Amino acid sequence: MGDPDASAAYASDVDDESDPMPTAGGSSRPVGVLPIAQLDALPPEERRRLAHKRGLYWPSTDEVRERLSETLHEVMRHEDDRVIDAPTSAGKSYTVATTNWGSLEFEDVTGDRSVIHLSKTRDARDEAIRAARSVDNDHFVLRARHEACPVAGGQYDPPENPEKDVDYTPLTVDGKPVSDWIGMMCDGRGLPFSAVHDRVTAVLDQDVHKLPCCRGEPDEDFPTMKPGSKGCDALKQWDRFREGDHDLVFATHNFAHVPGVRTETNVVFDEEPDFAADLSTDRVRRAVTAFLQRSAGDRMDAALLTYEDLVHVARHGIGAGTAGDQDDTREVIEEQLAFEPDLEWFFEVGDAHTLAPALARAIYYAEDRANGRRVGKTRYQPPRLDQNAREEEGWNASWVTVVLDDSNEIRRVRTTPDLEVARSVVGLDAHPALPVWQANTLPHMHKKTVLEREERQLWRRYERGLRVVQVGEHTHPLASGEYFSWDATHALVDQLCQEFGEEFSTAITASSVESDLEDIMVDVGIEEPQTMHYGEEKSRNDFGDEPVGFVNGCIDPGDDFVVDLLAELDLDATPERSETECDYCGGDGCPECDGTGRKRAHGRGFEGSDADTAAEILASVRENHTAQAAGRWARNPDDPSSTATVFVRTDAMPVGFADVQVPGVEWIWTEKQRRIVEAVRSASGQVTAREVADQTGVSKRHVLDVLDRLADHGTVVGVPNEGPNGATLYAENGVPHSGVVDLDSREEPRTGVTSTWSLVIREPSLSGVGEVVGDTSPEVRDSDSSDEAAISGGGEPPE
C-alpha cells in the first residue's frame, strides 16, 4: 500500500521455492490472504507469478480469446444453438468479423455455409465491418432501406423550409413526404420494402414514371442522381446476395426475418436480440377488426366481426346451444381465422397489418397463464409481395406470440423469426439472461461459458485493466427519472471532477436524466462531457480510451415486464406482497396490486416455483445493463496502459462485479448550510463562527455544528483560541460545492477464490440487492422551524 519497496519484497517472495504451492487438499502450512493493493504495484509478470504461487490463476487475454474461438467453432461445427457467455472486451465481435470463414480450415466448422453476423445497431455493425476491413476479410453487407434507398432515406422529401430552393423535384404522397408514406407502409402495416417500393410511383402526387434511385443517368428532375445506377441499391443488394457465395455477411438483427438470410446459414447474434413488436392495444384492435370484417365478407353466418367479439369468444367460449350449433359456429370461426387477405387489402385499408391474421389466431387460441395473463402463439407466414417470394410451406415462417391481461389489453406482441431452419444459431453476450434469449430466438437455447466467475473478475482487473468501484449501497432506479437527485448527483460528479480533473469527462445513465447529467458535468467545469444512455451502450467503444468513468443509477423494467415474459415462457412466479393494504383499493383488489389487495413488498423479490427465473429476467435489464455500461471503458486488453476506473452508483450489478465499495454521498447541503459554506469559501482569510452567522443569518450554534463537521471531513481547517475572545478561526480547505462525498475505500470487496485462498478485498454488501430505492443518500437536514437544526448523517430508505 504505497510502499516503494513492495515490488522488490514480493519479487523475492515469488522466487522462494521453499514455499510449496497449495493444492486442492490444502496447503503445507497456514498462509495469509493475498494483498490486492500490493499485487497492483507489481509488474504484470511478477504479479502473475506471485498469484499463481498462492494458488490463484487468471488466464491471459490470448488464452481468453483462444477459448472464445474454440467455443464458437465448437457450436458451429456441431450445428448447435447456444449463447456464448464471454466477458466484455474478450473480442466476441472482432473474432467473428476477422475470421476467414471461407478458408479450408473452417469448412468443417461452417459446413461450407455463410456466417451471418447480426448486430443490434448500425453503429455496432459498422464497427464490425471496420474490423473485417482491417484484416482484408472478404464480406458482404446488407443495409436498411434508409441507408440504401435515397427516396426512403428522405433525400427527395420537400425541404423543411418551403421557401428553400432545392435542385430536385420534391416527392410527396397526398401532400406528405414520400419517405413518410414508405415508413407508414413498412413500419405501420408491416409490408416488405420491395413491395412498397414498387408501388411508390403509382401513388406519388408528381408524374414520375421511375424513381430517382432507379435511374441510370441524371436528368432535369433529379440532377443529383449518381450516374451508372440502374435500379435501387436497396433492392439490388438482394440480387447480389442471392447470386454470390458470401462467407461472411453483416447486417442488423431485423434481417433475421428475411428467409434467405437464416435458411441453412450460421446465424450469429451479437448481443441479445429483441423481436417484440411495437403494437399498442388500439393498433391490434384496429388491425384485427379490419381483418375479421374482411374475412367475414358477405357471409351472414360470420361469428366474429370485431376485436371484442374475438376476445369474448376466446375467453368465454362459443356460448350455449346444441352441440351441432356450436360445431357449426366453431367451423365458421376457424374458416374466418384461416382466411388470407388479398395483397391489395394491405395497401388499401388503413387499419390493415400483415400480422393481423396471426394476431387473431393467437388471441383465439390463447391459454390462461400465471398473474392473470393469457398467451397465444402461432406459426405464421407473412405475405411476401416481392417477385422472389416462394410458395413452399415454412419458407417464410415466423412465430407470433401475444400476451393479454385480464382486461384484454395487449401486454406484448413478439414476432420471432423461425430459426429452426438455420444450420446453427450462436448468441454472443457478456451477461446473458437465458429466458430472454429463449423468448427471442429458440426455446431450447442454452449457455456455454468461456470463463468462470473468479477467472472473469481477475482477468478484468489484471489483464483488461478495468477497476469497478461501487458507490454507496442503494439501487437508484432512474428509468422514469422519479428518483433522480440533482444535488446528490452534482456532489458526486463535482468530487470526481476535483479528484481526476481532465481525466474524467464520460458517463452513462438512464435516458430520462441524460440531459440533466450533462448539465451537471458542464456546471462542475467539464467543457465537453460525453454521455451515453442505457440501451445504446452495447458493443460501443466510444469510451474505450478514457481513464475514468461514471455510471449513474440503473434502469428497472418494473414487474409487468417480468410477469409478461414469465407468461410467454409458461412459468409461474409472482411479485412478493407485504401485509399492508393496497393504497388504491384498500384491500379489495385492483389492477395495481394484481387483485391481491396488498402492496408490493419492499424490494424486488418474487415468489413461486419459478422465482429464480423471474429474478434472472429482472437482472437482464438491471444488473446486466449496469455491467455492460461499466464495460464501455478499458476496451483494449492488449495495451497494458489502457486501464480505467469506473464509479458505479448502484448496487444493481452482477455478484462479484465490483472490486471496491465506497460510501459515496454522505452529506448534501441544505439551503442554510449552503450559505455557511459559501461564506467560508468566499472569505479572504480566516473567519469565526460569529462572523459567518452574522453574514448568513443562521444561528451561531448551527454554524459551529456545520463548521466542526466540515473540519472533521478535512474540508475546513479550524485553529482554536486564535480569534477574538479565544474564538476558533476557520479557513476553507477545499470545501465541495454541493456536499461531502467519500470515495475512499474503507472496506474493499472480497472474493473467495478457492477453499484456502481469498483476496483481501470483500464483495460489496448484497443486503440491498433487489431493493428499489430512490436517491436516499445521507444528508444534513435543516429544520425550517428552528435554527438549532440537528445534523443527521443518514436516514432509512423509503418504502
Image (spheres, grey):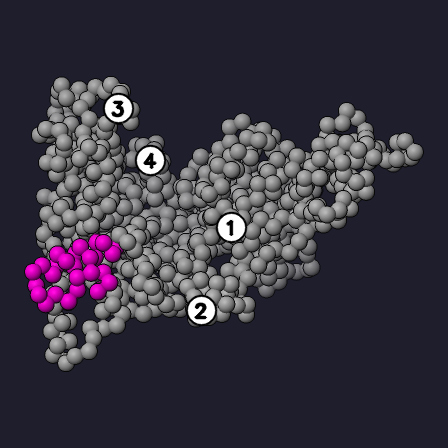
Residue furthest bottom in the image: 322
Write down the residue under mark 2: 589
Residue segment shown in magenta: 284-310
Q: Is residue 296 magenta?
A: yes
x 15%, y 51%: residue:
383
- Residue 271 in the figure: left or right of residue 241: right
Disc 1 packing (10 Å; few <14; some 14–19; many ≥20):
many
Q: Nearer the viewer, residue 15 or 291?
A: 291
Mark 3 vs 2, N-terminal side: 3
Numbered circle sitting on residue 162: 3
Disc 2 packing (10 Å; few <14; some 14–19; many ≥20):
some
Mark 4 vs 1, N-terminal side: 4
Tell me the distance, in whole angstroms, between the alpha carbons under discs 4 and 1.
32 Å
Tell me the distance, in whole angstroms, between the alpha carbons under discs 1 and 2.
27 Å
Write down the residue under mark 4: 126
Q: Position of residue 578 (x, y in %)?
A: 53, 67
Do tag 1 and tag 3 residues touch (Cβ < 8 Å)? no
Observer-side mark, 1 or 2, equals 2
x 10%, y 47%: residue:
344
Disc 3 packing (10 Å; few <14; some 14–19; many ≥20):
few
